[in-house]
Amino acid sequence: MTDFSVELRQVTKKFTSPEGTPVLAVDDVTLGIRDGEFFSLLGPSGCGKTTSLRMIAGFEQPTSGEVVIAGQAMGMTPPFQRPVNTVFQSYALFPHMTVTQNVAFGLEMKHTPRADIQKRVTEALAMVRLPGMEKRYPKQLSGGQQQRIALARALVNRPKVLLLDEPLGALDLKLRKEMQLELKTLQREVGITFVYVTHDQEEALTMSDRIAVMNMGKALHVGTPTEIYERPNCRFVADFIGETNFLPGTLAGCDGKRATVDCHGLRIIAETDHAPAPGTQVVVAVRPEKIRLHLEPPNTPNCFAGHIENVVYVGTDTRFEVKLAGEHRLRVRQQNLVSTPDLTAYFGGHTDVYAAWLPEAAQVLVE
Amino acid sequence: MLKTVRERPSLQGLVLISPTMFWLIAFLLVPSALIVVISFGARGSYGNVVYTFKLDNYVRLVNAEYGHILWDSTWIALLTTVACILAGYPLAYFIARSHPTRRSLFMFLILVPFWTNFLIRIYAWMIILRGEGVLNAVMTWLGLMNTSLGQWLFSQVQLYTPGAVLVGMVYEFLPFMILPLYTSLEKLDPSLLEAAADLGARPWRAFLRVTLPLSLPGIIAGSILVFIPAMGMFVVPDLMGGAKTVLVGNLIRNQFFTARDWPFGSAASMVLMALTLVVTLIYTRTFGFGEELVP
Amino acid sequence: MNERERTRPGRWLTLYAIAAYLYIYLPIFFLVLFSFNTSKFSVAMQGLTLRWYGDLFNDKAIWQATTNTLIVAITSTIFSTIVGTAAAIGLHRYNFRGKGFSEATLYIPVIIPEVVMGIALLAFFGQVGLTLGLPTIIIAHIAFSIPFVVLTVRARLQGMDRSVEEAAMDLGANEVVTFWRITLPLIMPGVLSGALLAFTLSLDDYIITLFTAGPGSTTLPLRVFSMLKQAVTPKVNALSSLWILVILVALLLSQRLQPRRG
């Protein structure tokens, strides 16, 4: 239980807006981040992820609740006394200091002997693959280089936890993807807990051991990337992560994990962890890539006749909009296994199809 | 994103601001309050202050003897402001339209005299406007002094006339007008004028309907920066207006030095502030407030 | 930004601008010119001489006034810069009770007519029993300089990236260390600008100094004024020319301090 590196216990943060109304930036969040984990806080702008990170760092104080780092409640401890270091979104490199002075700053604060400082700075720069930059000033570096110096400056202090606030936001796509890989590898090598804030779900899914999906100050779902993607626990998570089809209906019955839902004429068999009572208003969530289109009705539980309304060829797959009976529209994605420039090969010619998916591929979510 | 300043009232902030506040309260607020109190007092026989509560001083100010001083001061301040607008606008416009690299040079050139001591600048004009000064010499050399028009012109701005005071005031306050005007004009997006032209407006109309309204905040800011100090100005009238021109500032100065009637002088100060405030309020109510007030 | 270069000022406007600059600079030109004139009164240049500058250097009263002016300026600048910078940081970073009141009070010296401030201080010193002299002048100068320092430093603070201070704290620097190693170096141009502003305001001040100076504590502006009121010799021109030179140098220095913008 207590090999949690960082814990948020019922943490709430209230701000007062300029008009005077109270705003709950973080709403009763409880999280445990394990030692050595790459943990991401994921969500749209304003969901509270950055505020949560700043409370761990010590730049904000919770209105109620506790921040616990390495088993110790932080209380009012100021940032300079916490065993964490932050990589800022804007890098926040000291413009009037050289790279060496920047990276050595934290060590200076701890009164590390000069010889040690030199050694560790060289190590840190090697670790982020920027040796030889010692005498440069931040404004002489590119965005990617600045980002890595900011990383070195934080890591050289060997903190227990590294906090990263959307560090890759300012980089271009290719560089960002490279850095994602580097960060992940670095984290594995160094073994420190990383708490990573991002709004980019692909980034979170790629790099994290576990993710907390946040919205409106609440942590909605905490789990591994697979759990979050395949078994979202609520509509927002299902919608925010990837693409989902939502089919609203009424729960007809439940048998263990299997549930039967009546969606305005369609009888769908899906899975649920909650076993809601029959008659509850629910929503069936099924992802586009889990649906297969067939010309003949296959022998699977969820099989519905439909009509292809729209076809979009995207290279790796083809996207379809399929209209089922009862005004239901499904977005379907199928990988292009056939290789031909002839569009008619991709279901183009046939507009009447059968859409089918497995029960395990559909979740029953209660609103 | 909500601005995160330390929300809890902080001791450190108070500590940092307290020397400043102490100084300003002790040497600004308290003295000002003192003046208010004194303005209701009376002059003792030895020139000291007798603390009573009478409105006598204020009454004295608005009667015929001194009333015209207030009127003159307001009038000259207004004239100065208008003159600064008329003289300063084209110059500010010129600089704003110049090549970007030259603009800071041009502004610097305007600021250089501004930073020299204003007594020096007034003296410079005294040399020019003296009876035997530069202007006279030039006009004589041009033959203008032989004409009655030339003589009349010279007599209007000659030293020790109200005209000279106006020239001095404009010279003194011009940079205060040009700076906010320039700031306002510089922000003007040239594509707006292009749009106006595209829609059929000739240059003069585009100026009247687009440029002028958009530079209004600058005009207002500049007017306030000129009018308020101009109301209390006494040095220029003293040096360039001679004994003939007495403004509120001179009055106050005299009461505190020569006549030693501090209560009367204080009352005059109060009236000066009130008058300034009233005119400024009327002005901003009519035209709005200039955002460029802070440089 | 390229579009701006297409709109050049027209012919008439340029002409007007030239005339305006002449209007601004001609008086100064004549002032400096006549400081070298051998004749005391005549407008025509009758010869070049440095006699008036010589007279200036021998004038004890002027030396005294200059010394006084410098003492006042330097003292008030140092004090108001330190106090004003502290206030700017306090206002920028913290919320405290009475913050609104403080901000409002800081605006008063900016909008109050100098005459009124002068007499207020005169009355105040009289009531408190403080004899007028250099100390009272210094007190007054500090009072009107502080708001300008606060304004200048605050502008610089607002342009500074706050996350740099947070980064320092994150790396283990407490508030004091953060201020010394990070904040102060970064706002230094603003602090120096504010100091220069305070210094110039003090050097130049006539009106408030008039009311707070004692008989033995004349400053240069006061001396110039009395010289103007009495017999005017080109000595005044010489003094003025030197003064202009000093200011010019100071201005050029301050331009160097501004960070190069784009």
Image: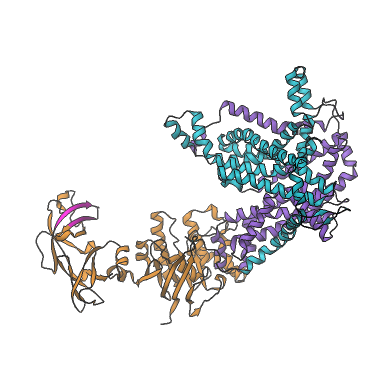
Chain colours: A orange, B cyan, C purple
From the viewer's perspective, is residue C190 above or below residue A303? above
* Main SS class of the magenta portion in the image: strand
Instruction: Tell me if C5 is positioned left or right of B59 in this view.
Output: left
Tell me the magenta residue range: A306-322
Say whether residue A315 is magenta.
yes
Q: Quadrant of the C terminus of chain A?
A: bottom left
Q: Quadrant of the N terminus of chain A?
A: bottom left
Q: How many marks?
A: 0
Residue C245 seen anywhere in this rendered image of the structure = no
Instruction: Tell me if A327 is positioned left or right of B283 in this view.
Output: left
Residue B81 pos. (x, y %) = 65, 38
Instruction: Tell me if A267 is positioned left or right of B272 in this view.
Output: left
Residue B65 pos. (x, y %) = 78, 41
Instruction: Tell me if B78 is positioned left or right of B34 in this view.
Output: left
Residue A36 seen anywhere in this rendered image of the structure = yes
**Residue A4 is drawn in which quadrant?**
bottom left
Say whether residue A79 is magenta.
no
From the viewer's perspective, is residue A10 above or below residue A133? below
Foreground residue among C107 and A65? C107
Foreground residue among B171 and C256? B171
Residue found at the far left of this picture? A296
Residue C158 pos. (x, y %) = 58, 55
From the viewer's perspective, is residue A163 above or below residue C243? below
**Residue B31 is drawn in which quadrant?**
bottom right
Foreground residue among B130 and C35? B130
Residue A357 pos. (x, y %) = 17, 66
